[in-house]
Image (cartoon, rainbow, N blue to C red):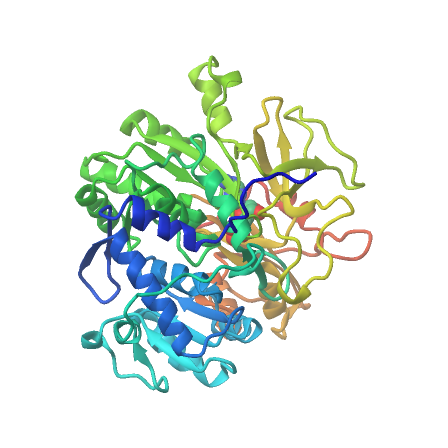
Amino acid sequence: MLGLMQDWPLLVSKFIDHAAVNHPNREIVGLLPEGGKFKYTYADMAKRSKMCAQALERAGIQLGERVGTLAWNSHRHAEIWFGASGMGAVTHTINPRLFPEQLIYIMNHAEDKLLFLDITFVPLVEKIAEHLKTIHTYVIMVGKEHMPETSLEGALSYEEFIGAEDGNYDWPVFDENTACSLCYTSGTTGNPKGVLYSHRSNFLHTLVALAGDTLGIGGQSVILPVVPMFHANAWGIPYAAAGCGAKVAFNGPHHDPETLHQLMMDEEVTVTAAVPTVWLGMLKYLQATGKDVGKLTTVTIGGSAAPRSMIQAFQDDYGVRVNHAWGMTETSPLGSLGSENAAVQNLSKEEKLDIQCKQGRSVLGVEMCIKDDDGNDLPRDGESSGGLYVRGPWVVKEYFKGDAGQILDDNNWFDTGDVACIDEYGYMHITDRAKDVIKSGGEWISSIDLENAAVAHPDVAEAAVIGVFHPKWDERPLLVLVMEEGKTIGLEAMNAHLVKHVAKWWLPDDVQFVDELPHTATGKISKKDLRDQFKDYKLPTA
Ligand code: AMP
């Protein structure tokens, strides 16, 4: 027997409609890429999101077609999220930090038809435009008065693009399983892979993001999502903020501590979220200037492990609660969060800090387990460490266009590539990473691409790259080389060779030489053994 409740498709347009009706005067503010600050309300955002939807329809965008964004966090970017997805297209958020070849690859793979881009990225897109096979319209996210000279054919200004519309528009209603947004992850081996979120997955994810124990946001919150809208949906914050009427402060292209701090003070920010590298800079800034954090009560830290000293400094020196979160592009991204449950309430301060250094308990909707190499379940004893597997309604089922084939096991578990243990209270702790990628400042570096580039050097016999701890960037690449007999090379010369193949920020911080690299039984380089070999090694840049 089926229940007798209403069929109300879970569409993300409902968030902005809700905000417009229930929180029409709540403010959105933002620092603009073209300079200056902007302020308006949810009522304005809702109207302009509809104007954006109308403009996309006029530009010929059809249901299911991909609309790219190459943009910082801003009110315009949020309007596109609601406008494009709301009218039935797929919002494809593109990470501008990728190497040009990767950008070309993913825009062609996604078959983006229209690209919204910030003025900051005009030179970048001009350089690659001839390779972008499917984009027929470029919209630069500024007003007409700020339109740059550009070789991008027929480029329009965003304000002109949406300004021709009236905003009298009813969001179309369609199946909640319709594709809503697309985000490529480079946190896997091989080419970046697309994670295609549905309206339903984004809606359910938002409900959990709004739960009391999750990000700590509600109607009174003023939230500053420093985490970019192009990386794992800014942890769902733009949807969640509209869903509860929180004021949002967008930092635009600014990530330096001074500007972020000023924005926090000016807008009386209460909640914020970013990767550890951002908070390390902020803590240093606060300590150097003696400034306080104003109204800030909660900071969510994720993307990489939050160091103990950082958690302690926020809590003890600034009275700010730290929420340590774990997630992935493949998990929309919220997977686990470190809020306190009743079982740990009475532990000592030190014990609680130990728990906060872990990556938290799974949120409702995400199931988690750890398995050994043979696929056997491991106990939740805080010691047994194995591959971390997840499943749930906002966890990926397969990558866009079936890339990488079947990615779930027979019981629908997705292998995260992280290695973890889970304790008796349910707190998960990442202990290692099985996937062969390095996370630096929240963004991925492919060790395989670096290795391939290194062995292309005629004097190199074999090369391996591992991630090594770095206090600012969390991890940086270390290149380990076996040289051809009688040959030597320095870091500078090696990097001069590598920079022809990879982005500058990928270049290794150091090179070490060995007579041979450890190999597995199947002849692959054993990164696990290599990491063990270099476990006491310290980078000269650290
Ligand atoms: P991404 O898809 O780029 O968001 O990266 C997801 C990956 O980042 C995870 O699989 C982890 O390897 C890593 N990660 C995310 N959050 C944390 C955390 N709190 N601690 C350690 N690693 C993390």
Residue 542 in sight in this render? no
Return the x and y of residue 517 as percentages of the image width and height: 70, 55
Tell me the quarter of the picture where residue 512 sits.
bottom right
- Quick check: 249 left or right of 90? left
From the viewer's side, name the closer residue of 172 and 79. Answer: 172
Q: Residue at x 42, y 17 (%)?
A: 349
Residue at the location (52% across, 68% down)?
Answer: 494
Nearer to me, 185 or 179: 179
Q: Nearer the viewer, residue 376 or 283?
A: 376
Does residue 13 appear anywhere in the picture? Answer: yes
100 versus 315 height, above or below: below
Q: Is residue 295 above or below residue 8?
A: above
Query: Could you say where residue 94 lies in the image, as x and y percent from the top left?
Result: 46, 65
Position of residue 166 measured from the top left corner of the image (x, y, whole percent): 27, 69
Q: Quadrant of residue 461?
A: bottom right
Percent of width and height locating residue 104: 51, 75
Is 362 placed left or right of 471 in the picture?
right
Instruction: Pick the quarter of the image with the N terminus.
Output: top right
- The number of numbered badges drawn on the structure is 0
Residue drawn at (43%, 65%), measured in percent from left and top? 84
